[in-house]
Image (cartoon, grey):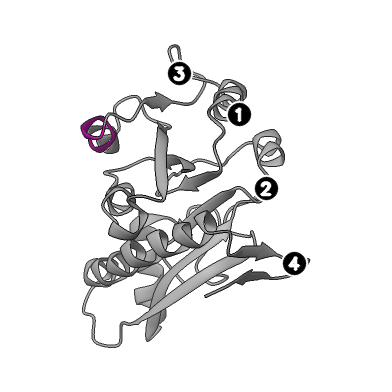
Amino acid sequence: MFSLAVFVSGRGSNLNSILNAPRLRNLIEVKVVVSNKEHCPAFDIAKKYSIPVYSVGNKEGFKSFNELENLFLSLEIDLIVLAGFLKLIPVAFIESFRNKIINIHPALLPSFGGSGMYGMNVHRAVFNSSAQVSGASIHFVDESYDTGKIIAQRSVDISDVHSPEELAERVLKIEHQLLPDVIEKFALGKVFVDKTRVRVLN
């Protein structure tokens, strides 16, 4: 089985989409769920599936990223998925898992990315720009926000939306389709990293 660690900060809808994707059921195993919060709503989803949960940070009772690294190595984690995780990953941790950490972003990168561009902040910016198309991007995580190589994108028509909230709902549906698709490609060994681009085989 292809082993995942999933990082979350919110309610965990993308985590839920991974756990309930029929195509992933006999292909992957989510071995651990991590949050920057002590009481993360997504932990309730993980506990429903008997998945161990950990909080990461500098607070008492939280694990450090160094401790997580050792844990992930012992669990033989194949891929780390940031699914709505709102903190910057330390450089040393990224170096230890280079090209094994991916993030889903609720817009078509490289537009509408960077520090502070998460959640409704992204959707308000897209809506106010009068863009006619939005979507979701999955990219490798590097040392700064939303600048790693793009792995896959999927677009959606937003020409008829009337609010950032309506736009967000439309993009979230795309996220729930795209993330399991990309994880499946990783599990099947169909993702290849070149010097400047990422190739994903059908």
Q: Secondary structure at mark 3?
A: loop
Find residue 61 and report its image quarter. Answer: top left
- Residue at 27% across / 67% down in the picture? 173
Q: Pick whichever of labels 2 and 3 is earlier in the sequence.
A: 3
- x, y percent for residue 172: 30, 64
Q: Pick whichever of labels 3 and 1 is earlier in the sequence.
A: 3
Q: In the rendering, which numbered label is found on residue 73?
A: 1
- Which portion, as a residue range, is magenta? 45-49
Q: Pick whichever of labels 1 and 4 is earlier in the sequence.
A: 1
Residue occupied by mark 3:
62
Residue occupied by mark 2:
143
- x, y percent for residue 124: 35, 67
- Tag in front: 2 or 1: 1
Determine contact: label 2, label 3, CB under 8 Å: no
- Residue at 34% across / 75% down in the picture? 127
> Is 98 drawn above or below residue 105 in the view shown?
above
Amino acid type at circle 3 is Phe
Magenta stretch prevailing secondary structure: helix
Near mark 4 (Cα within 10 A), the count class, few <14, some 14-19 or many ≥20, is few
Determine contact: label 3, label 1, CB under 8 Å: no
Residue 159 horizontal side relative to residue 74, left or right: left
Q: CA distance from mark 1 to mark 4?
A: 25 Å
